[in-house]
Image (spheres, helix red, strand yellow):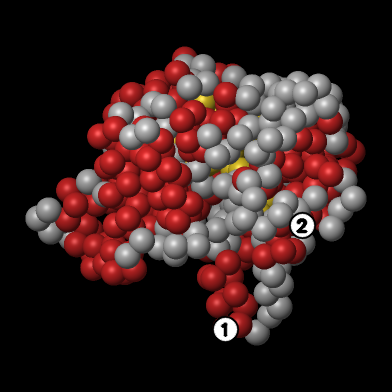
Amino acid sequence: MSSDPALRDPSPGQDPSIGSTDGAGRPLPDFSNTEETFRHLSNGQLSQAARLFALMGRPWLTNALSSLGAQAVRFRLPGAAWSVRQTVYRQFVGGVSLKDALPNIQALAERGVTSLLDYGSEAGSDDSAFAHALHEVERGIEFGGQNPAAKAVVLKLTGIAPDGVLEAYNDRRIDFDAALPEDLAPVIARLDQVCSYASSAHVQVYLDAEESWFQNTIDQLADEMMRRYNADRVVVLNTFQLYRHDRLAFLKASFERAESMGYLLGAKLVRGAYMVKERARAEEHGYASPIQPDIESTHRDFNAAVRFCLEHLERISVTIGSHNAESMTRAAAFMDEQGLRRDHERVNFAQLLGMSDNLTFNLSAAGFRASKYMVYGPVTAVLPYLVRRAEENTSVTGEMGREASLIQRERVRRRG
């Protein structure tokens, strides 16, 4: 355990923000403040959210969504898409299109929260699919360039590149100054097109992390785009999944590379999303798992990565992506202790739409920069994303339990 009070573990079950203040006596965000969290919701909307999270606590729903529901939607069975849209889609997706998501974007902006635009299609299979994904991302950039409420887009490389190409270069060094291989050149051209357009529109591009057998290729592409476009301001951000045991060291190496090459590092820090798949593949193929040995190691490295970035803001722009109240409090407290402005232009906190509103809105209310991942797209495109959200919310010890508890607490408070 660290001797730094900002990094000390709170007492079990205690919200580390309650009653805390910074060095100047300003209160830190109180993540138990349900009045602030849900003040944008009517009693009817709050009741609807309570019913949804209660429903998602039942494993049969998750199983149905991930198997029968997915097939029903794909084969356009009557009522299947409608059923999904009335449940998990309504909670976690902004709309079928940017236009459809606009009311949600505006509602967040009224609470001082910006949107990270994320078209929900997760993987392409041919040039037509890649072109469609590229078009949607560019539409997001155009939208963000005209709307201060949405100044960033999210891009998954598997949406614009064949899995086979990403995997083929995972164990190879790409020489960007030489003639590019025929299979890789179109991928780099598409990515450069996105980053160039974003740079001219003053919009940021978040490159999502993916499975380890793609990630080294993605990291190389991210470094090259940062070299091209992050000279004076951060346009491109790479994502670091700290549930991997090598990512803290890689973050520091990425910083050293950026320093030596003369560009700014853009870093989005997350814990990670592919743990089960990673361990299963490592066992199947007989190599050491890249995943941390336990959750405590993940927490340790995540908090250390946050601190490293906050200590180097002269050369790093960081987005702290987490649903963990303890990590958010530690980061906020450390910023205050170091005398950093709460609205520092190179620090942003982010959570997914429909989850952890108590973090997002209380951070914003306390003066910190906060964002939501605004996922949008038709049901068929976002279905894999929705399955993951439903799975996360099944356990009463996971997100569903926390969300449902906060909603119920606010309902009781409103009843007096």
Return the residue nearer the eye: 262 or 303: 303
When the figure is inspected, residue 88 is found, relative to residue 163, above or below; the finding is above
Give me the residue at 62% from left, 78% from top. 282
Looking at this view, is 54 or 414 the one in front? 414
Residue located beneath label 2 in the image: 300
Identified at 71% across, 54% down, the residue is: 11
SS at mark 2? helix
Position of the C terminus, as image quadrant, is: top left
Q: Quadrant of residue 281?
A: bottom right
Residue closest to the eye, 140 or 268: 268
Circle 1 SS class: helix
Q: Residue at x 54, y 49 (%)?
A: 157
Answer with left or right where residue 242 lies relative to residue 311: left
Q: Position of residue 243 (x, y in %)?
A: 67, 61
Mark 1 → mark 2, Cα distance in angstroms: 28 Å
When asked about the image quadrant of residue 193, the answer is top right
Q: Which is more N-terminal, label 2 or label 1?
A: 1
Q: Amino acid at mark 2?
A: Arg
Q: Find residue 142 and report its image quarter.
A: top left
Q: Around disc 1, counting alpha carbons within 10 Å, would you say few (fewer than 14), some (14 to 19), or many (20 or more)? A: few
Task: Answer left or right for 413 relative to 42.
Answer: right
Where is residue 154 shown, x and y percent of the image? 52, 38
- What amino acid does circle 1 point to? Glu
Identify the residue position indicated by label 1 in the image: 284
The numbered dot on residue 309 is none
Q: Quadrant of the N terminus?
A: bottom right
Image coordinates for residue 285, horizontal then vertical, percent:
61, 82
Residue at image x 72%, y 51%? 10
List the single residue furthest toward the left: 78
Q: Kindly report which numbered mark, 1 or 2, lies closer to the viewer in this rendering.
A: 2
User: Can residue 36 be seen?
Assistant: yes
Which x, y percent locates residue 414? 36, 32
